[in-house]
Image (cartoon, rainbow, N blue to C red):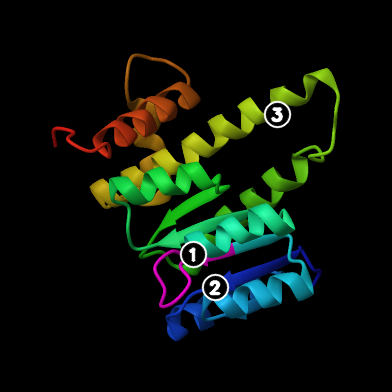
Amino acid sequence: MSNKGKILVVDDDRLVLATLTHGLAQAGYEVIDADNGDDAILLAREHRPELALLDIRMEGMSGFDVAAYLREYLQIPFMFLSAFADDDTVTQVKALGAVAYLVKPLDIHQIVPAVEAAFAQTRERPPRATSEPSAAAPVVADETLHAVSVAVGVLMHRYSLSRSEALARLQQMGDGGSLEQQALRLVEAVELLALPGAVR
């Protein structure tokens, strides 16, 4: 089977980790796995994966801690897989710049397409070192793509929807604006709710 790319998978639930590792390997990915944040960083430094799939809440270093390290020191893109989609978590996911946000429970058949989309998205990005005047344009595209991913994750959690159902609901929301506009509005609303003293 052809190697579609190298992915680091991190989850402190051994059963979830084994399921993800097996499923992604079957789908053609080279998988490196870790059940804690410290090992995840060591493996990322050694193997330089093209993408990381991170659980958020783990003993010791959280997925957020690992993501911040991957972004700052290794420039490795990451996506989150979490059972939590509260307002504070969503705000932090967005602030860190994850390429996707998946809400458990998900089966491997839902996760593989999301991983494939994340690989495609990260490979389309221009190198960070570009100094052309137009370098700001892809950042806007990344922001809107990211907003769609976060908005879908929020809808999946709030209404117990599948990924495709959540995307369909997002497309039906609002006043006929683009999908990206609807997503940005939803994410902004979630961020407002997460502010101290916000009415809930």
- How far, Cα to Cα, is label 2 from label 1? 8 Å
Whichever of callouts 2 and 1 sits on the residue coming sooner in the sequence is 2
Q: Residue at x 47, y 19 (%)?
A: 178
> Any magenta on residue 56?
yes
| Residue ID for mark 3 | 138
Q: Is residue 16 left or right of residue 39?
A: left
Q: In which quarter of the image is the C terminus?
A: top left
Q: Is mark 2 on a helix, strand or loop?
A: strand
Q: What element carries label 3?
A: helix
Q: Is mark 1 on a helix, strand or loop?
A: helix
- Three-letter amino acid code at disc 2? Val
- Three-letter amino acid code at disc 3? Pro
Q: Of residues 123 and 165, which is closer to you in this image?
A: 123
How far across and down, in percent of the image, does residue 194 sit? 27, 40
| Residue ID for mark 1 | 63
Q: Residue at x 30, y 30 (%)?
A: 189
| Residue ID for mark 2 | 10
| Closer to the eye: label 2 or 1 | 1
How far across and down, in percent of the image, does residue 45 sit? 74, 71
Q: Residue at x 63, y 50 (%)?
A: 118
Give the residues drawn in magenta, as a range.
53-62
- Three-letter amino acid code at disc 1? Gly
Mark 3 neighbour density, 10 Å: few (under 14) some (14–19) many (20 or more): few
Whichever of callouts 3 and 2 sits on the residue coming sooner in the sequence is 2
Callout 3 touching callout 2 (CB < 8 Å): no
Q: In this view, does 62 lie to the left or right of 5?
A: left
Q: Give the main secondary structure of the magenta stretch.
A: loop
Q: How many numbered markers are drawn?
A: 3
Q: Which residue is drawn at 82% across and 40% down?
A: 127
How far across and down, in percent of the image, does residue 112 sit? 57, 61
